[in-house]
Image (cartoon, rainbow, N blue to C red):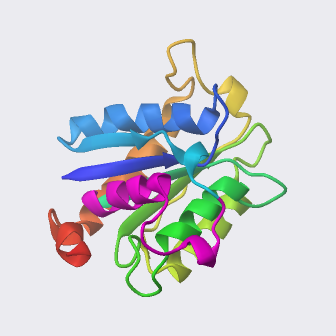
Amino acid sequence: MKVLGISGSLRRDSHNTKLLGVASEMFERYGVEFEIYNDLRAVPPYDEDDDREPTPAAVARLRAAVARADGVFFSTPEYNHSIPGQLKNAVDWLSRPAGSGALSGKHVAVIGASAGMFGAVWAQAELRKVLAAAGARVVEGEVAVGHAHTRFDEQGRFTAPELGEQVDAVIEALLAAVEPGESAELAA
């Protein structure tokens, strides 16, 4: 089984990318191949005029990475009580063509971290809504890592064990929802 991790943050020292790093170790314990997608910055703004063949190269890479995965594990920061523009833009590209985009029928999970006390809960809710509208199958579960700058040690591990338990619960929900090879069949 293969799961793709997508961080909604472009920042070099992103808390959400660290969160995916922790999740990566957990996925490995389940024998799941976990890849973090690192090219979100290259995806151009969605423009229907550009959504034709040949697809922009960065979009083609993103769509292919999502199509190859059995599930997608998103980690989002919160910008102005919502999801970052670059992440929303990526979801817009992944939702096309309507009804058969790379996210259509794909099992996804959403977690998040922010420097504020609420751990990106509004952004997570917004992202779940947008993903569902794009045709994704959003699994239950939430991890809200508030005060994220205090939640990771120098090695990128959690400073609070309960956060690991919460991430593990969301991982288990995603893995329970995904049948190996199902997403590859849907994309064919």
Residue 28 to residue 62: above or below: above
Residue situated in front as seen by the camera: 90 or 109: 90
Q: Where on the picture, by quarter, is residue 185? A: bottom left
Seen from this angle, which residue lies furthest front?
54
Residue situated in front as seen by the camera: 36 or 168: 36
Residue range corresponding to the magenta coloring:
45-70
Residue situated in front as seen by the camera: 15 or 97: 97
Rendering coords of residue 93 (x, y %): 53, 68
**Which quarter shows the C terminus?**
bottom left
Rendering coords of residue 53 (x, y %): 42, 72
Residue occupying image coordinates x 30% and y 63% = 67
In this rendering, would 36 be left or right of 71? right
In this rendering, would 169 be left or right of 74? left
Residue occupying image coordinates x 79% and y 52% = 79
Rendering coords of residue 83 (x, y %): 70, 59
The answer to whether any part of residue 8 appears in the image is yes
Residue occupying image coordinates x 74% and y 34% = 147
